[in-house]
Image (cartoon, helix red, strand yellow):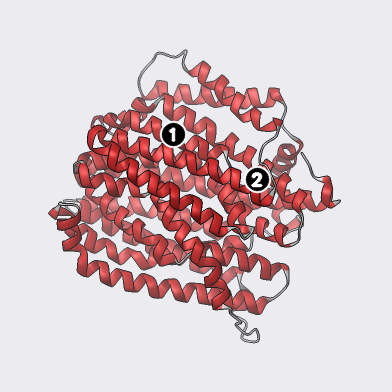
Amino acid sequence: MARSGDNEPSSYEHETRQLARGGGLLFAGQIASRLLLAGGMALMAGLLGATQFGLFALARSTVRVLQPLLALGLQGGVVRYIAIYDADSRPDQVKGTVRIGVMLVTLTGCAAAALLWLLAPRVAQQLFHKPDLAQPLQVMSIAIPFVVLAQVLGQCTVARKKTGSYAASLVTFAAALPLCFLLLYYLSDAGAVEAVVSFIAAAAASAAVAGWGVIVLFPELRDRAVPATSHIGVLLAFSAPLMLADLSNLGLYQVNTFLAGFWVDSALVGAYTMVSYIAFFGTVGLVAVRGIFRPTIAHLHSQQKASQLEGLFKTTTRWAALLGLPVLAFIAVEAPAILRIVGEEYVVAAWPLRILCIGQAVNVLTGAVGQVLTMTGHQWQDLANTAVMAVVNVALCIVLTPPYLITGTALAAAIALGAANIARLCQVWYHVRIWPYDVSTLKPVLSTLAAVGVLLLFHCEGVVWLLVKLATFSGVVVAVYVLLGPEKDDRMVFAALCRRLRPGAGLTTDQPPDGP
């Protein structure tokens, strides 16, 4: 792996350890939140039934369609400029960036909530042709300010490479959602509306935790002697194309549930939503890695440390593949058994789940390509790429969903997602001249293939056997990877994580502990 160009191997190792500490904590938070959220969604899907769960999913999808527009791209803008201002020791600029970001998304979120409350009956009837959706959609509008505020506040803490509070915010939401739902379920005859109320409570709790993290991690916000210097024009100029890219990403990642509601009944919408959550679980490693990698990209690129950036890009891509490919492969092979745990009515979505896993596998194998583009100042190129692929996804949904139902919806999503990430990969090479692959990238791929081969030897059904298969599969992945020989970066990261897990170890490292 190339690291010598900057003649700063110690700096490279410092950045790698930072990524290990912050990324490891965020990965743990992502794992916990995804497990809780997947379990909570499965619980809600089983108790509500596919039809009521489908109505909840459509209400949530409507808010997700609005979310990128309301966030204004600031979740990317604050990461970039807080990282740059921190590197240049400008606390006044950091303070101004945080304040203006929070103020703008609060205003847009409240305005959108009021508008959706008024328009909900018309949207339910005229757009989805589902009158029963009106009340869940109306109530869901209340969640909008909390959702966008939690998103931007969380990214503020990530920009400082302190991921503890962001991870806590994710876990809070994932834990509060099923707990609130169970409470309402046993107090009343729960339906889609009660599920939406649970979502609002969880989003509010998540925003509160993220806000607490920002207050703790940004002491300059409480220091009256530090002026708040903001360059709103610069921030919005950078964030505007990110907002458009987020809208385009919406067309790649989240709009399919929304579109499926036009042509299929609520039960199939519920089934598609369930498999979308399950497939997305395989990207937990990628989300954690790219989340903590974003400020590092901006920092190293601004310092013109190209070889360090490329070395970390290769390392993080290998980590994303190692953490994601085995999960996606296991889900794809055992799709019917996994869905049968949720309920027999969801098994119809086994093939859509497998198709979505293939699309997410391409996503995982290309690493943080989108973040490299945006954090190096090529956000317009990323916007152009994602916009084109979003149009492709919507067009494929329109063509494939009516004849093939949710299998066609999943196929549209997988094709567009895979093509978008391959295009980003080419753009990163063209504009930044760095590449995320070397021979070491083959190790997680070969480990996963070996484990799949062993898994196919099993011909047993049932929950107990599923757990046995999971344990065997995981053991084979780890054993083959170790036999192939972990990289130096892997050993360094493992040692850093072990030191962090020891009591008091976080206080003796070259960086303060992540999170409050």
Mark whose residue sits in front, 2 or 1 = 2
Examine the image and state in which quarter residue 206 appears: bottom left
Near-viewer residue (257 or 157): 257
Question: Would you say 159 lies left or right of 115 here?
Answer: right
Left or right for 478, reference 344: right
Name the quarter where the N terminus is drawn: top right
**Closer to the camera in the image, 16 or 420:** 420
Identify which amino acid the numbered label 2 is placed on. Answer: Trp
Looking at the image, is 200 positioned above or below residue 470? below
Mark closest to the chain's N terminus, 2 or 1: 1
Residue 429's disc is 2
The percent position of residue 468, horizontal first and vertical second, equals 46, 22
Residue 54 badge: none
The residue that appears at 70% across and 53% down in the rendered structure is 18
- Place of residue 283 in the rendered image (x, y in percent of width and height, measured from the top left): 50, 41
The numbered disc on residue 357 is 1
Give the quadrant of residue 140: bottom left
How far apart are the alpha carbons under marks 2 and 1? 26 Å
Q: Do the residues labelled 2 and 1 touch (CB within 8 Å)?
A: no
Q: Is residue 46 visible?
A: no
